[in-house]
Amino acid sequence: MGRIFEVRKSAMFARWDKMAKNFTRIGKEIIIAVKAGGPDPGTNAALRRCFQNARSVGMPKDRVEAAIKRAQGKELINYDEILYEGYAPHGVAVLVETATDNHVRTVANVKSIFNKGGGTLGNSGSVAFQFKKMGVFKLKPEGLSQEDLELELIDFGLEELGEGTGENGEEVLVLRCAFPDFGNLQKGLEEKGINPLSAEIEWIPTTTVELSEEQAQDVLKLVDKLEQDEDVQKVFHNLQ
């Protein structure tokens, strides 16, 4: 009985940790969006995207409102978005998106994690060329025709449409567009009354690296350590 409890407890804490990390990440995104475009989601597409993502991870309304208030407060913390590039063990390319109020702390932490994990922090441009920056939307598939959706959204910048999995492993439709077309595709979905489960900017690898299970674990341990850092928003890699 104790063993089962420990497994369940571990899984429970893992979910809580992931949930807390998502809330922190989206809270920073809300602050950045409000600072750039104001607190009205009707005129701020980036803020609408944040609201969609907050709903997708179950972020409480009061935490969303608190983030908006912080963004408008006098003692606002300014977050700078910085992209770090490097290599994990076995030659896997890694991109690390951060939102930080202390550049020195962040780069020191990220570099330390790379070094301890058997990787190397690189210079700007050393890794990003192996990825394509794209807008990624996830939709509930119920009531939607993939063929019709593709035809209707291609003029809004849709490049790829396929099936995938959501935050909790559920089936979703995944739509991708080039980064400059993110706003156009978001507008196209809004015009059709479709509310995405999530709307993100992601770095999609153009080529992937295939490793053994043991080697892949080395890479995933490094990625996990990076994701746990308080300044890290998202981590992307080209591990197959």
Image (cartoon, helix red, strand yellow):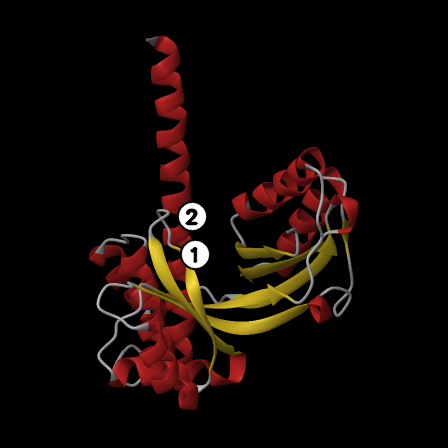
* Residue 209, x across and y down, in percent: 71, 53
Q: Residues within 10 Å of mark 2 (few under 14, many from 20)?
A: some
**What residue is pinned by disc 1?**
25
Q: Give the farthest residue toward the front.
A: 147
Distance CA(mark 1)–CA(mark 2): 6 Å
Query: Which image quadrant for residue 222?
Result: top right
Q: Is residue 88 above or below residue 181?
A: above
* Residue 131, x across and y down, in percent: 65, 68
Q: Write the residue at 72% across / 49% down.
A: 111
* Residue 91, x across and y down, in percent: 78, 50
Q: Write the residue at 78% across / 59% down.
A: 122
Q: Is residue 39 above or below residue 108?
A: below
Q: Residues within 10 Å of mark 1 (few under 14, many from 20)?
A: some
Left or right, residue 180 beside residue 131:
left
Nearer to the camera, 82 or 5: 5
* Tally of marks: 2
**Secondary structure beneath disc 1?**
helix
Q: Amino acid at mark 1?
A: Arg
* Callouts 1 and 2 close, C-beta under 8 Å: yes
The answer to whether any part of residue 151 appears in the image is yes
Please state, as top left, top right, bottom left or bottom right, where the N terminus lies in the image: top left
Q: Give the farthest residue toward the top.
A: 1
Q: Write the residue at 36% across / 77% down.
A: 147
**What residue is pinned by disc 2?**
21
Left or right, residue 115 beside residue 48:
right
Q: Write the residue at 29% across / 73% down.
A: 145
* Residue 223, x across and y down, in percent: 61, 46
Q: Amino acid at mark 2?
A: Lys
**Secondary structure beneath disc 2?**
helix
Query: Which image quadrant for residue 61?
Result: bottom left
Nearer to the camera, 205 or 221: 205
Query: Which image quadrant for residue 43?
Result: bottom left
